Image: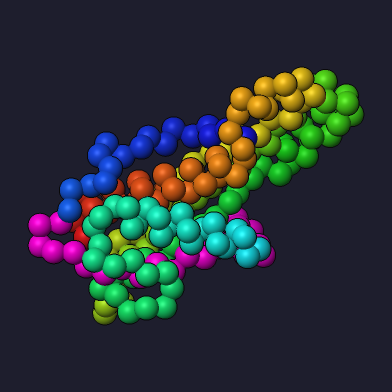
């Protein structure tokens, strides 16, 4: 699995701390609806990954007096919706051709990883909406098996993509003066 988007890391991480003092933030991380409007089932492991990467990015930013995940009262609430959209038709066709040729012709699947973050103040007034997207790709071919020991595990690629999406959201929000 590889990252194929043009997502650039923040210019400075962690960002400069706010001059007026730090606020607390509460994160509500959930799975968002697909393009057809349905919300796919989320396993415990996937939900945990979503929450951990968000909490890690917000904590390491150093911009907040406290970071809580779901439920606690805070100065700012971040509703983070994570959507994974894939090209199912192309992936099916590519997988069929690769399978039909016993892996001689490579198969390819891709998905867009999208975070949609809505920041709200204590009064539930919307402070900002920030959307970020990264494309992940996966090649399947019999001869690529020899390259596998030299590539990152798919789970590591997904974790780093989630983490970077949250970092960029935080960086943009901080630049806009939201916190």
Residue at horizontal 79%, vertical 34%?
Answer: 95
Left or right: 163 in relation to 152: left
Residue that appears at 23% across and 47% down: 15
User: Is 17 situated left or right of 103 in this image?
Assistant: left
Nearest the viewer among 28 and 32 is 28
Colouring of the image: rainbow
Residue 8 position within the rendered picture, expressed as x and y whole percent measured from the top left: 37, 35
Horizontal and vertical percent for residue 87? 66, 42
Examine the rendered structure and indicate whether residue 52 appears above or below residue 73: above
Q: In the shown orientation, is residue 164 left or right of residue 107?
A: left
- Let me know if residue 112 appears in the view: no
Q: Is residue 9 left or right of residue 36?
A: left
Q: Tell me the magenta residue range.
A: 18-41
Specify the quadrant of the image occupied by residue 54: bottom left
Residue 55, placed above or below residue 164: below
Residue at 57% in and 63% down = 47
Look at the magenta stretch and give its main secondary structure.
Answer: loop
Q: Residue at x 60, y 44 (%)?
A: 155
Q: Is residue 30 visible?
A: yes
Q: Quadrant of the N terminus?
A: top right
Q: Quadrant of residue 10?
A: top left
Which image quadrant: the C terminus? Answer: bottom left
Residue 44 pos. (x, y %): 63, 65
* Total numbered badges shown on the rendered structure: 0
| Residue 22 is a magenta residue | yes
Q: Residue furthest left?
A: 19
Asked if residue 103 lies in the magenta stretch, the reply is: no
């Amino acid at each position: 699995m590889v990252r194929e988007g043009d997502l650039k890391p923040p210019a400075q991480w962690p960002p400069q701390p706010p001059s007026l003092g730090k606020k607390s933030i509460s994160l509500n991380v959930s799975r968002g609806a697909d393009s057809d409007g349905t919300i796919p089932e989320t396993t415990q492991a996937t939900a945990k990954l979503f929450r951990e990467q968000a909490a890690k990015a917000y904590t390491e930013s150093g911009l907040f007096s406290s970071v809580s995940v779901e439920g606690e009262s805070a100065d700012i609430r971040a509703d983070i919706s994570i959507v994974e959209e894939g090209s199912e038709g192309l992936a099916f066709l590519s997988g069929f051709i690769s399978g039909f040729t016993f892996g001689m012709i490579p198969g390819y699947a891709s998905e867009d990883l999208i975070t949609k973050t809505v920041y709200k103040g204590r009064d539930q007034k919307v402070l900002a909406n920030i959307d970020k997207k990264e494309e992940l790709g996966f090649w399947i071919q019999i001869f690529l098996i020899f390259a596998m020991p030299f590539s990152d595990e798919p789970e590591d690629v997904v974790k780093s993509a989630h983490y970077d999406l949250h970092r960029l959201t935080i960086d943009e929000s901080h630049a806009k003066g939201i916190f």
